[in-house]
Image (spheres, rainbow, N blue to C red):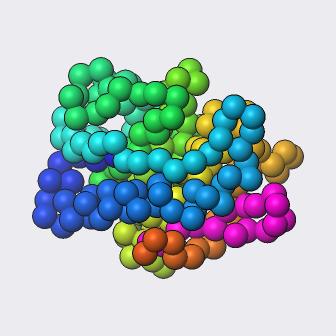
Amino acid sequence: TIFWGKAWTTASKKTLAGQINTFFDAILDSPLIDQLGEYSVAGQVIGHGKRVGSATVTSPSLSHSISDGALQHFLQHQVGSNPGVPQPTPNTLFFIYLPPGISVAQGGARSCQAFCGYHNDIAAQLYYAVMPYPGCGGCSGGLAPLDALTATSSHELCEAITDAVPGRGWYDDPGNSEIGDLCAWKTKKVAGSTVQLEWSNKAGACV
């Protein structure tokens, strides 16, 4: 997890960041990952993981809007220069959390207008997810900030596992949806946290 922005150094946001890290510590070793096992294929078995680090980064400072390209540049710089950010492996997923008031432009769309988070890759070698702060009604879903963030984080986590390079893994064509998109804002509790339901081919439903 990478928390970018000075806001993450305030007491309330430090607490929130700690709660997000606790969420990952539990959810990566939980039944949520077990249910993705049906998407395992030969040579690529989906199993439990673990959080391998966390960093709070205050420089460079953020403007009110940032592009996906700028986020990729930021991540590559952190991987190369920040000792608190581990080197990537094919099984590493970086989650970048942004502070309130920052919107993200990606694929011709903008956060809070068209999406609440997304995952992507850099040359099928560096995998990441971007989590704008849920400061709008469309991305809070009536939930508290922590619950909105864990729900969206679980959505992107499960999609990044089953469709690591968007469109080249599990993808609902022609619906253009991944397993989280098909079940958006349907939630349940797993390991003490709010997570989103995910599409199951086996059940033919959101589970």
Which residue is depicted at the point 57% across and 48% down?
Answer: 47
The foreground one among 166 and 161 is 161
| Residue 78 occupies quadrant | top left
How far across and how far down the image is residue 204, in percent?
Answer: 84, 65
How far across and how far down the image is residue 99, in percent?
Answer: 30, 53
The foreground one among 152 and 162 is 162
Which residue is depicted at the point 73% across and 68% down?
Answer: 206
Q: Is residue 87 left or right of residue 47?
A: left
Q: Is residue 83 magenta?
A: no
| Residue 55 occupies quadrant | top left
| Residue 19 occupies quadrant | bottom left
Whether residue 140 is visible, yes or no, is no
Q: Is residue 177 left or right of residue 186?
A: right
Which region of the structure is painted magenta?
A: 193-207
Which quadrant of the figure contains the C terminus? bottom right
How far across and how far down the image is residue 176, in percent?
Answer: 77, 47
Which residue is depicted at the point 48% across and 79% down?
Answer: 142
